[in-house]
Amino acid sequence: MLKNNIFRNIWRNIFRSRTRSILTMSGIAVGAFAVALISQISATGAGQVSVLLENMGINTVLVQSKQTNAAARLTDRDITALNAINGVAQAMPLMSANARAEILQKSLSCLVWGINGEAKEIISLRALHGRLIDARDTVSGARVCVIDEDIARKTYGRSNIVGKKINLLIGGEYREFEVIGVASSGLSVLQSALAGIIPDFVYIPFSTMQELTGRKTYDKIAVLLNDNADDGVTGRIELKLGGSGDTGANSGELIASNLLQQKNQLRGIMGTVTLALSVIAGISLFVAGLTVMTTMLVSVNERTREIGIKKSVGAGNFDIMREFLTESALLSFMGSAAGSLMALLVSFTGCRILGLDFLFSFGRFLSPVLFSLFLGGVFGAYPALKAANMNPIDALRS
């Protein structure tokens, strides 16, 4: 009968000292909340960074000069050679130059990119108003441009300024361009977060940029990889550029930066930071475990006579120890479950407010509960053993 009433006795003992039990569970809940919330924030952050990097063209290999300020001599022949490599979906010429933009008597620092009509697939360029650079612009060398939305808002106070004129300082003098589109790129979020560090972008046909700068080559080539591209594609690109036709002069001077590998490295760094923060948050769970031990020791002292009565009517040491261990585990479970559920609610609400995707993982919220149960068993062992080994005669005399 004693064994059948164990859970009823545990519930009665927990609610007998209601305030103490609530405080104990609250300490556990705070620790579990911290661990679960840190894990969720890390997962959400990693997901957002991954999406941001992919929008920036993270699934590309950027071919450029090893020298920071040097211009590589890349040609159409290099692009043809790259397109023939297994694992390459598309190669696009790129040119870039720091410039000044004048619009409505306002002067802005910007980075001018020379692109073609394939840019929207490779660097995730999206037209908010108007259109993007297309093949006709590239063939004709048109004096047209696509600008960042930020430039439009900084000058006209609105995003749609299609048809307006802008003067760009390229090739040593200002040239007039017509704005044919206002775009949002994969870098837009990063530009907003790092305002003043990452410049605004202006996109023009690369043929126009070649004409204005007096060059016939490209600075860079952006190579879009297939989804099933293997890890060796970067090496094949460097090998191809090191010994093919026009690129022979570039042998040893070019570098192919696999941005996908940098993404994986960033994930590793974020994982390490998350682990460190989770360990720090786990310390609060450890402290809460000490609170459980204190609570159970007090409970043993208060229930000394009860333990003596139970032993006198046939309860064994194992029965007493099991009851106290179960009570300790139950306190830990209820506290950690409440903390994890609160972290789940806060995470979901925060994601909805910020407009982020909520990435739910059952294991992420279950892990602090299991860890708390383990701590409850460890820190409840000593009080349980103390109660189990109590002499029934001495207990009845107390």
Image (tube, grey):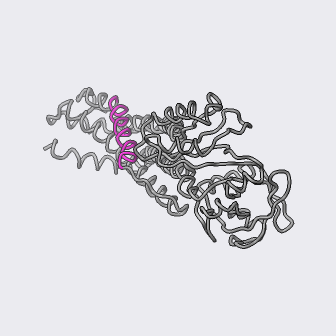
Residue 324 place in picture, x, y as percent? 29, 37
Q: Is residue 335 left or right of residue 4?
A: right
**Magenta residues, start to end:** 362-382
User: Which residue is most to the front?
Assistant: 245
Frontmost residue, 296 versus 143 = 143
Frontmost residue, 270 versus 35 = 270
| Residue 38 seen from this side | no
Q: In which quarter of the image is residue 126?
A: bottom right
The residue under the point 68% across, 68% down is 180
Residue 306 place in picture, x, y as percent? 26, 39
Frontmost residue, 140 versus 187 = 140
Q: In this view, does 140 lie to the left or right of 35?
A: right
Q: Is residue 9 left or right of residue 118?
A: left
Answer whether residue 64 is magenta in the image.
Answer: no
Frontmost residue, 186 versus 287 = 186
Point out the image quarter for the N terminus: top left
Magenta stretch: dominant SS?
A: helix
Residue 327 place in picture, x, y as percent? 30, 42
The residue under the point 49% across, 35% down is 279
Answer whether residue 367 is magenta in the image.
Answer: yes
Point out the image quarter for the C terminus: top left
